[in-house]
Image: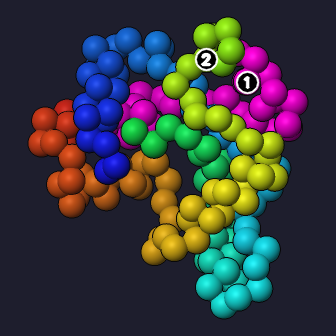
């Protein structure tokens, strides 16, 4: 967990049932593109093979989250739905940028054009030992007890 304090804030918001104030989670459908590496070295080719295999073995995973790990973990811990904004085209990204300027959407880091975003995410995931959904990640964190006990208790009740 990169920043446990942010998780605590998001968790409290979700627990108090005011999660609608949270910004939407930007996602890219895997049908639009995969976060693959263009490099031909062994590590890149291994990564590409592993991500394709993961998606083949997990057909229920349909989207790649661009931003929002702490928020989606808090939503999952409190049994809330993740509200997403689906980015299928660069026009969608431009529209999100305009909404960010007016304050209608906040809390999202800058989003790049889709191809560039997929490349950046591929580089980010290149050294990952495994891939997982938000739910799987949350359950792993519970099992390993890397989040506060009160959050675990709330999830398990």
Where residue 60 appears, x then y in whole percent? 61, 53
Identify which residue is drawn at 52% across, 25% down: 107
Q: Which residue is mark 1?
A: 97
Identify which residue is drawn at 48% across, 60% down: 132
User: Quick check: 82 left or right of 35?
Assistant: left
Where residue 13 appears, x then y in whole percent? 32, 19
| Residue 78 visible | no
**Range shown magenta:** 71-99
Identify which residue is drawn at 63% across, 10% down: 104
Nearest the viewer among 93 and 58 is 93
Q: Residues within 10 Å of mark 2 (few under 14, many from 20)?
A: some
User: Quick check: 9 left or right of 151?
Assistant: right
Colour logic: rainbow
User: Quick check: 43 left or right of 127?
Assistant: right
Where residue 17 appears, x then y in whole percent? 34, 14
Q: Secondary structure at mark 2?
A: loop
Q: Give the label, 2 or 1, closer to the camera.
A: 1
Nearest the viewer among 102 and 139 is 102
User: Quick check: 139 left or right of 129?
Assistant: left
* Residue 81 counted in the magenta span: yes
* Residue 108 counted in the magenta span: no
Mark number, residue 105: 2
Indicate whether 74 appears above or below 44. above
| Residue 62 visible | yes
Q: Who comes first in sequence, dot 2 or dot 1?
A: 1
């Amino acid at each position: 967990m990169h920043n446990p304090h942010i998780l605590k804030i998001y968790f409290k918001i979700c627990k108090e049932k005011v999660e609608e104030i949270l910004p939407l989670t930007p996602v890219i459908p895997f049908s639009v593109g995969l976060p693959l590496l263009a490099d031909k070295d062994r590590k890149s080719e291994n990564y590409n093979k592993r991500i394709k295999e993961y998606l083949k073995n997990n057909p229920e995973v349909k989207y790649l989250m661009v931003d929002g790990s702490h928020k989606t973990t808090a939503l999952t811990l409190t049994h809330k739905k993740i509200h997403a904004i689906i980015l299928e085209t660069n026009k969608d990204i431009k529209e999100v940028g305009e909404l960010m300027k007016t304050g209608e959407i906040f809390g999202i880091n800058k989003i790049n054009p889709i191809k560039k975003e997929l490349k950046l995410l591929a580089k980010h995931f290149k050294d990952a030992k495994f891939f997982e959904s938000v739910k799987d990640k949350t359950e792993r964190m519970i099992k390993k007890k890397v989040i506060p006990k009160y959050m675990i208790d709330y999830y398990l009740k």
